[in-house]
Image (spheres, grey):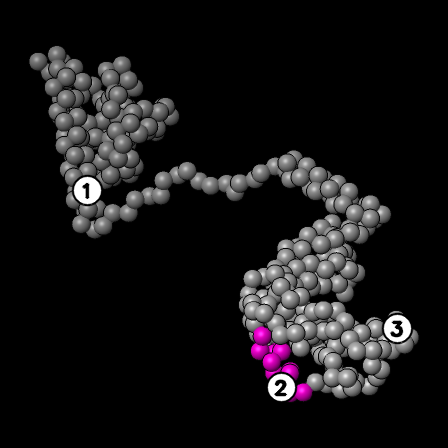
């Protein structure tokens, strides 16, 4: 079959038109009568017409036809033609086969998944879109990883019940995660100790010591002013205990009556134990009603007047 005359830009000469199909020649052959035919038209005519006569001049048609001259073939290839698939491009007849097979977006092509079973033909420009929606495209079962085609996926999942198994597994795992106790490692809220530099620590120690001496001196003055403890009897020679007049914050120890007296704590509220009556007492809370071994020996001045 030849090419339609309306596809060409200009008037096509009559000697380039097939005598049988009345279209522009495609793969032309020449008979002994010098008439030109399309090769396919000649084969079909010989099968139908038993007389094998030329439609134009009734001359005998030979099966072994000859190709036309080189001049005829060059004239035919030099004609301007629109693409036969109506893409709108105008080109030479000699360029048409390559354009149709490689470039034309309207050319019918086989589906990219034809090897898997698809027999559909689509336009070249729609091939990618069709490949994404084709029922014969390869897919992987999301439940078990089985490879199959899209049209057989539902059959596979209903037969193997793999999707239901995966859903049950996901539900059970979600329930286990929801019932799991969240554990956090224990941590300490204690503030780390502050380290002081030597330039800060030394003045702090000196000021603390000075404040302690000042407080103990004030306590001795208060006891003397109240008359609770006579000034001349604060260190009794026969007492083996710390003198009540000595501030409880003193750290030094002394020997009174041949006995070593313990060095009390820095705190004025430190509790001491009497070595005679074995009762506890605090040096800053001595009173006239306390044990004499706590408050010291009392001597009446009337006997000496």
Which residue bears the numbered disc 2? Answer: 71
Q: Which of the 4 quarters of the picture holds residue 22? A: bottom right
Residue 74 sits inside the magenta stretch: yes
Task: Name the residue: 28% across, 37% down.
Answer: 263
Residue 206 appearing in the image = yes
**Considering depth in this image, is 105 or 3 the residue closer to the camera?**
3
Q: Which residue is mark 3?
A: 49
**Mark 2, other Cα within 10 Å: few <14 / some 14–19 / many ≥20:** few
Residue indicated by mark 1: 204
Residue most extreme to the top: 302
Is residue 19 rendered to the left or right of residue 221? Answer: right
> Which residue is at the front of the view, 120 or 51?
51
Q: Which residues are magenta?
A: 69-79
Q: Determine whether, in the image, residue 91 is placed left or right of residue 171.
A: left
Q: Quadrant of the C terminus?
A: top left
Q: What secondary structure predominates along the stretch shown in magenta? A: helix
Q: Which mark is residue 56?
A: none
Residue in front for this viewpoint, 163 or 100 = 100
Does 32 sit above or below residue 245? Answer: below
Q: Eyeballing the image, is 192 above or below 219?
A: below
Q: x%, y% of residue 212?
A: 19, 34
Location of residue 187 with respect to 272 vertically, above or below? below
Helix, strand or loop status at disc 1: helix
Earlier in the chain: of badge 1 and badge 2, it is 2
């Amino acid at each position: 079959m030849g090419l339609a005359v309306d596809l060409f830009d200009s008037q096509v000469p009559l000697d380039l038109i097939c005598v049988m199909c009345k279209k522009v020649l495609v793969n032309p052959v020449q008979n002994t009568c010098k008439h030109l035919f399309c090769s396919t038209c000649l084969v079909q005519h010989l099968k139908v017409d038993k007389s094998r006569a030329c439609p134009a001049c009734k001359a005998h048609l030979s099966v072994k036809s000859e190709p036309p001259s080189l001049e005829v073939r060059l004239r035919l290839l030099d004609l301007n033609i629109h693409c036969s698939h109506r893409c709108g491009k105008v080109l030479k007849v000699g360029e048409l086969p390559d354009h149709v097979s490689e470039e034309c977006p309207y050319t019918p092509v086989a589906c990219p998944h034809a090897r898997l079973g698809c027999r559909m033909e689509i336009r070249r420009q729609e091939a990618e879109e069709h490949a994404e929606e084709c029922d014969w495209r390869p897919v992987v079962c999301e439940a078990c990883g089985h490879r199959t085609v899209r049209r057989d996926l539902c059959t596979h999942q209903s037969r193997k019940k793999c999707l239901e198994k995966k859903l049950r597994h996901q539900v059970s795992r979600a329930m286990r995660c929801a019932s799991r106790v969240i554990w956090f490692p224990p941590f300490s809220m204690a503030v780390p100790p502050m380290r002081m530099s030597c330039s800060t620590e030394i003045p702090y120690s000196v000021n603390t010591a000075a404040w302690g001496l000042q407080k103990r001196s004030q306590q001795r003055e208060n006891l003397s002013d109240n008359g609770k403890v006579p000034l001349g009897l604060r260190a009794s020679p026969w007492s083996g205990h710390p003198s009540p007049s000595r501030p409880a914050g003193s750290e030094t120890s002394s020997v009174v009556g041949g006995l070593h007296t313990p060095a009390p704590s820095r705190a004025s509220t430190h509790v001491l134990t009497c070595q005679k009556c074995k009762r506890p007492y605090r040096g800053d809370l001595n009173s006239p009603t306390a044990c004499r071994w706590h408050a010291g020996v009392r001597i009446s001045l009337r006997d000496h007047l």
